[in-house]
Amino acid sequence: MAGELGLGLIGSGAIARAMYVPAATALASQGVRLLAVADTVPEKADALAASTGAVAYHDHRRLLEHPGLQAVVVATTIGTHAAVALDALRAGKHVLLQKPMGTTLAEADEIIATAQRQGVTLQCEPPHRMNPNAERVRQDMREGRIGKPCLFVARAAHAGPPDRPWFYFQEHGGSVIFDMGVHALSWVLGVAGPARRVSAAYTRSIPERLINNQPLKPDIIDNALITLELASGALASVITNYCTVASLVPSVEVYGSEGTILVNGPQANYMRFSSGGVLERPGAAQSELGWFMPTRTTGHLARLTTGEETRDARLSSLNHFVTCIRTGATPIPDGKFARHTLEVMVKAAEAATTGQAQSLSTEF
Ligand SMILES: NC(=O)c1ccc[n+]([C@@H]2O[C@H](COP(=O)([O-])OP(=O)(O)OC[C@H]3O[C@@H](n4cnc5c(N)ncnc54)[C@H](O)[C@@H]3O)[C@@H](O)[C@H]2O)c1
């Protein structure tokens, strides 16, 4: 076994509890030790510490001084990602950073430069670019199985977080694009390559919601269509919203001159149709998995896969992060990929506001 790796979790909320703690526990046999957890809400840090045996901190800067800590996961509210990540990088820690890496390109540039200067690993969520179905799409395209790829369509949508108000307010980094659209964008860009231009239409479709059974008036848009002109010459359409109670559509579609690929969810169904009408469906035994269905109790979405595949993705992500720290390999996705995704999101907002398509300057 490689040596021990001391890990800290900054942000002790839903994703930390449901995804990263189980992932860290699963990697204990590989020497990963969850040493410390932090949250600005003391009870949250204390509760997570009590359930994991880690030490609780109420200020992430104190957590960064914890003896033996080499790496952190930043899983705080979106508006704090960049500042917390920069503190961690400046303290010489490897950083696995929740999406988006920041809310401005200046923040993204500073994060990338600081990680390089410090010689530490920076990995950015979400991990779709490295999931097996994304690789399968890339391979099918490389090997010419769908002819010339012409159009990519991706959706990432649900009914909106039912219980945490911060997701609905810009001052906390709330944004359906940053929270959900980033998944669809990462998928498309991860298989189709960089984009050159973006246009978009945004709207607030549900002006008042019940969050924690209290009426709330969000200041974010909750419904967006983003169109990308890709460097390859193909087009992409990205749909994201907090207005989808249920859907029966694949989340990624790839249309080529000789065939179509449909991928339903990050690691569930994968279907390929050729122009001759032949259907290939690797892993067809999973045919019942991955469809979204409404639940009566919450009015929110549940997946028939019960979240296993999402947990698997998070485990792969932490596992990859640990491997990259130990081997010095460049993570997938790295800061450059996340910065390009962020530029698309920032410029999509400009495009929606001005009605003008915006050119993109970053690559990966
Ligand atoms: N919940 C999910 O399924 C999910 C999935 C993927 C990604 N994410 C992303 O993970 C991040 C966290 O989401 P969540 O759902 O866990 O939200 P959450 O509200 O449950 O947790 C966020 C926590 O961060 C804490 N926090 C805020 N600023 C802090 C700081 N400076 N230092 C320490 N703690 C701080 C908050 O008090 C809160 O407890 C977001 O970026 C979100 O987009 C969440």
Image (cartoon, rainbow, N blue to C red):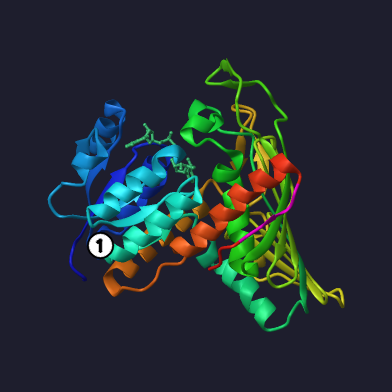
Q: Position of residue 267 (x, y in %)?
A: 57, 60
The residue indicated by pointer 1 is 29
Residue 158 or residue 278, whichever sits in front: 158
Name which quarter of the figure residue 209 lies in.
top right
- Ligand number 1: quarter of image: top left
Q: Position of residue 200 (x, y in %)?
A: 73, 47
Q: Position of residue 295 (x, y in %)?
A: 63, 33
Image height of 205 relative to 229, above or below:
above
| Element on which disc 1 rests | helix
Which region shows up in magenta? Answer: 356-360
Farthest residue in the bottom direction? 143
Q: Main secondary structure of the magenta part?
A: loop
Image height of 142 relative to 193, above or below:
below
Residue 118 or residue 126, whichever sits in front: 118
Image height of 248 relative to 262, above or below:
above
Residue 56 or residue 96, whichever sits in front: 96
Residue at position x 70%, y 40% in the image = 353
Farthest residue in the right direction? 276
Amino acid type shown at disc 1:
Ser
Name which quarter of the figure residue 197 lies in.
bottom right
- Is residue 328 part of the magenta span, yes or no? no
| Left or right: 188 as drawn, with respect to 325 | right
| Left or right: 5 as drawn, with respect to 96 | left
Name which quarter of the figure residue 76 lies in.
top left
